[in-house]
């Protein structure tokens, strides 16, 4: 689950440059529609006061540079009041020239001064005006940056995990995936509520707002390129429709769906789910175990909560373990996956491990590395 195929970096950069230079009408419309529903993870924002101070600093630098340019060539300027231009006059000329078109009391008279005004002063005036209207330009730039981020994400996302529903079940599923080593960049959340999508964005995930029973919503989540799909909405009928739609869009993805009632599990499997987890029956079993043996219930809860104490891990066997008994493994082996068959630890056929086997072990929880 840690191996994720990615496109070559050159291909992604070429696509990004192409999107900045030219996009067809259909691509522009598609990106605009996606921008309304896709929520990208939050990036570190610069405090407003710091933004103002940065702009002020750049404006003062432009003003100082213009003053220096004018003062160096002060002999090429004429002041109508006294005929000469000193440092104060140069600063005054730079201020009124950058902020307005000038008052005409100080004018360039030499060819060199006029050439400098054309090639240097005028571009600096434009830069100064850009800084003054930076708030409006920042909004436009942010929109463009957001569209570029979404376009780049859509072109690069492959073999990812789509989680439909960011309620209690969806959040815990995402936490487990991250604990198992799936990077946040490889997880996409789909939810009908904007609030849930924003919460996913705050958690560092890409989120799509929309009805997951509709093909266009799942296509915006790139479900056609996904390797796994987790279906965890609030209603079983919604889960069935989402599963059916996802399976039609992606025939190869592994789909795991959650159902409230046991009677709906066969329908979900017929719709294309590979595995169906029934929440009501699972909760009922845990309640029964808790009544008979609370310590067993706590142990089961520990095993199901990744990173809390003991974890159930599925992994391939090592070369040293091939041919050995499952009991010789460092961690307790509870089952072995051989081909498509699951062999429990007490199975009489499980005398030794074979090449290609995968073992399910109970191991001590490890704290996942922070990204």
Image (cartoon, rainbow, N blue to C red):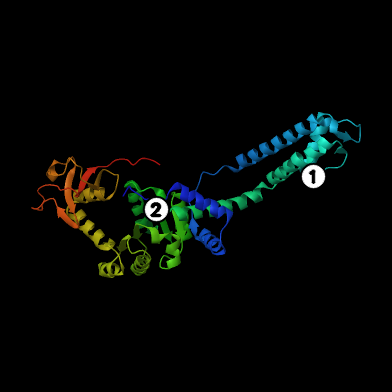
> How many marks overall?
2
Give residue 265's position: percent from left, percent from top. Answer: 27, 67
> Mark 1 and mark 2: span between their CA atoms?
51 Å
Which residue is nearer to you in this view: 252 or 368? 252
Q: Residue at x 56, y 59 (%)?
A: 23
Q: Residues within 10 Å of mark 1 (few under 14, many from 20)?
A: few
- Contact? badges 1 and 2 (CB < 8 Å): no
Q: Quadrant of residue 326?
A: top left
Give residue 76's position: percent from left, percent from top. Answer: 85, 33
Give residue 362's position: percent from left, percent from top. Answer: 21, 45
Q: Secondary structure at mark 2?
A: strand
Q: Is residue 233 above or below residue 186?
A: below
Give residue 106's position: percent from left, percent from top. Answer: 86, 37
Q: Residue at x 70, y 45 (%)?
A: 132
| Pointer 1 residue | 100
99 horizontally vs 83: left or right: left
Q: Secondary structure at mark 1?
A: loop
Q: Is residue 201 above or below residue 370?
A: below
Is residue 199 at least partly visible in the picture?
A: no
Which residue is nearer to you in this view: 60 or 355? 355
Q: Residue at x 31, y 69 (%)?
A: 271
Precedes in sequence: disc 1 or disc 2: 1
| Pointer 2 residue | 187
139 horizontally vs 70: left or right: left
Q: Residue at x 49, y 58 (%)?
A: 38
């Amino acid at each position: 689950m840690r191996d994720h195929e990615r496109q070559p970096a050159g291909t992604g950069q070429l696509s990004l440059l192409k999107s900045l230079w030219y996009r067809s009408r259909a691509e522009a419309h598609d990106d605009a529609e996606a921008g309304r529903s896709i929520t990208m993870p939050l990036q570190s924002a610069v405090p407003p006061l710091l933004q103002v101070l940065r702009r002020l600093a750049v404006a003062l630098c432009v003003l100082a540079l213009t003053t220096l340019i004018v003062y160096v060539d002060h002999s090429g300027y004429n002041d109508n009041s006294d005929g000469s231009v000193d440092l104060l006059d140069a600063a005054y000329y730079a201020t009124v020239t950058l902020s307005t078109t000038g008052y005409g009391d100080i004018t360039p008279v030499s060819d060199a001064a006029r050439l400098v005004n054309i090639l240097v002063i005028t571009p600096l005036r434009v830069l100064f005006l850009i800084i003054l209207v930076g708030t409006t330009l920042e909004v436009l730039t942010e929109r463009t940056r957001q569209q570029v981020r979404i376009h780049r994400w859509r072109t690069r996302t492959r073999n990812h995990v789509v989680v439909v529903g960011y309620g209690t079940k969806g959040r815990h599923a995402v936490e487990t995936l991250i604990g198992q080593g799936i990077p946040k960049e490889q997880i996409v959340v789909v939810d009908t509520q904007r609030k849930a999508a924003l919460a996913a964005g705050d958690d560092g995930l890409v989120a799509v707002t929309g009805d997951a029973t509709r093909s266009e919503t799942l296509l915006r989540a790139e479900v056609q390129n996904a390797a796994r799909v987790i279906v965890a909405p609030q209603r079983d009928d919604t889960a069935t429709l989402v599963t059916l739609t996802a399976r039609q869009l992606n025939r190869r993805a592994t789909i795991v769906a959650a159902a409230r009632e046991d009677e709906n599990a066969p329908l979900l499997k017929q719709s294309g789910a590979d595995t169906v987890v029934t929440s009501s029956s699972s909760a009922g079993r845990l309640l029964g175990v808790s009544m008979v043996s609370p310590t067993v219930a706590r142990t089961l809860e520990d095993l199901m909560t990744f990173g809390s104490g003991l974890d159930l891990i599925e992994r391939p066997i090592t070369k040293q373990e091939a041919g050995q008994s499952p009991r010789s493994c460092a961690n307790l082996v509870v089952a072995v996956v051989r081909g498509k068959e699951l062999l429990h630890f007490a199975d009489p056929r499980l005398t030794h491990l074979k090449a290609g086997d995968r073992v399910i072990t109970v191991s001590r929880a490890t704290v996942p590395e922070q990204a």
